[in-house]
Image (cartoon, helix red, strand yellow):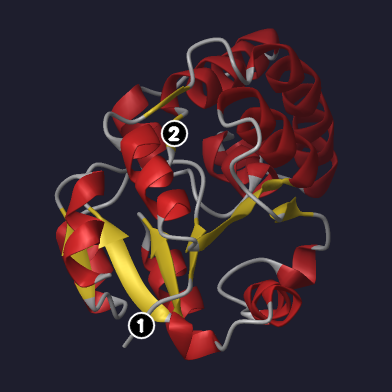
Amino acid sequence: MKYKGVIFDLDGTLVNSLHDIADSMNIVLKRYNYPTHSYKEYKNFIGSGIRSLVEKSLPIKHNNAKQINHCFNLMIDVYRDNCTSKTKPYDGILKLLDHLISRNIRISVLSNKSDEFTKKITHTLFPNYFDPVIGLSIETLKKPNPFVALEISKNLGIKNEEIIYIGDTGIDMQTANNANMYAVGVLWGFRSEEELIANGAKYLLNNPLDLIKIL
């Protein structure tokens, strides 16, 4: 198969955003005198959007709709000021992107992070690399719903089966398979090899440049 496009997840795939996300959420929790969480714990909270992160972070007895909304809005405000403080591309990512572009392979970003932050982080750290860059704006279209991935395929004029979808979570692998794209999991992200395989990863990358082997 000759692949003509690659869709990347953002958090845990292109960038290590763990510290900025965790630090921001812990600021919110401290405002309410709630217990905070470790970076290791946040690895399992990330992947389904900020509202889901908030729900998973709150203590059970305060996990109601009203408090989730309060903390969600506060998290948005805090994270807006901190989303690029410590977040950086993983080693080898920029070399991979340059290689893909040199081969005229179209590259895009699709994330469950809010569209505002997905665009801000991507355009700050990877100016002029990706088109399109799409984050979450409608909850019902959240991955693993393949709708947005299929729209990207359509807009690029590339068949689904000619696109590689790369991510670090089971949700990403489900998205790829739901869209009939080639599911590639990364082992440097926030989830385990077992989760990726269980959710349909067709190929696993130990480092970004490993992708060249299947192009």
Name the residue at 62% across, 49% down. 52
Quarter that holds the N terminus: bottom left
- The spot of residue 174 in percent (x, y) is 44, 77
Secondary structure type for disc 1: loop
**Image quadrant assignment for residue 144:** bottom right
Secondary structure type for disc 2: strand
Gap in angstroms between the C-alphas marked 2 and 1: 26 Å
**Image quadrant assignment for residue 112:** bottom right
The three-letter code of the residue at mark 2 reads: Val
Is 158 displayed left or right of 47 in the figure? right
Is 172 rendered above or below residue 11?
A: below
Quarter that holds the C terminus: bottom left
Name the residue at 61% across, 11% down. 27
- Callout 2 crowding tier (Cα within 10 Å): few <14, some 14–19, many ≥20: some
- The spot of residue 184 in percent (x, y) is 31, 68
Give the mark nearest the N terminus, 2 or 1.
1
Is 187 displayed left or right of 151 in the figure? left
**Image quadrant assignment for residue 25:** top right
- The spot of residue 85 in percent (x, y) is 56, 10
Mark identifier at residue 92: none
Residue 165 appears in the rendering: yes
Name the residue at 83% across, 39% down. 69
Q: Which residue is mark 1?
A: 2
Q: Nearer the viewer, mark 2 or mark 1?
A: 1
The three-letter code of the residue at mark 1 reads: Lys
Mark identifier at residue 15: 2
Is 160 rendered above or below residue 59?
A: below
Residue 180 appears in the rendering: no
